[in-house]
Image (spheres, rainbow, N blue to C red):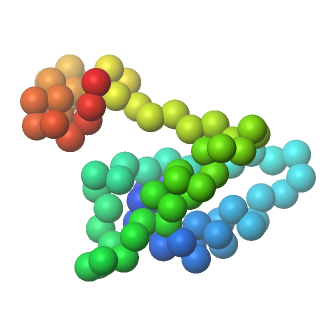
């Protein structure tokens, strides 16, 4: 599921509740690009805060070193502080 930083808590719950037996789910999002209005907390942030403690759930945070586009993109994002080392 891509762009999950723009999902509310209810929408994240809806996605996760669709997971079937013998399935895997990957939630991808960038909290620095959240477009939810006003004071709406990203459901992705809530999920990260709550679910990372579960032994069958893994969280991986990418850094500028993981950017597979032009090196200039990684350099710019690092300089702008959008992606942390």
| Up/down of 21 relative to 41, above or below | above
Judge left or right: residue 17 versus residue 26: right
**Observer-nearest residue: 49 or 79?**
49
x and y percentages locating residue 80 in the rendered image: 10, 37
What count of labels does the image hold?
0
Image quadrant where residue 77 sits: top left
Residue at the (35%, 53%) spot, across then down: 31
Image quadrant where residue 71 sits: top left
| Up/down of 75 relative to 4, above or below | above
| Up/down of 21 relative to 18, above or below | above
Placement of the C terminus among the 4 image quadrants: top left
x and y percentages locating residue 37 in the rendered image: 29, 78
Q: Is residue 68 visible?
A: no
Judge left or right: residue 51 versus residue 63: right
Placement of the N terminus among the 4 image quadrants: bottom right
Image quadrant where residue 9 sits: bottom right
x and y percentages locating residue 26 in the rendered image: 61, 46
x and y percentages locating residue 61 in the rendered image: 44, 34
| Up/down of 10 relative to 62, above or below | below
Residue at the (65%, 44%) spot, across then down: 53
**Observer-nearest residue: 6 or 39?**
39
Residue at the (49%, 66%) spot, across then down: 43
């Amino acid at each position: 599921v891509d762009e999950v930083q723009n999902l509310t808590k209810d929408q994240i719950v809806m996605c996760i509740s669709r997971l079937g037996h013998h399935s895997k789910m990957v939630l991808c999002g960038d909290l620095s690009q959240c477009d939810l209005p006003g004071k709406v907390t990203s459901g992705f942030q809530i999920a990260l805060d709550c679910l990372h403690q579960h032994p069958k759930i893994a969280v991986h945070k990418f850094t500028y070193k993981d950017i597979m586009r032009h090196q200039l993109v990684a350099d710019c994002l690092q300089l702008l502080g959008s992606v942390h080392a």
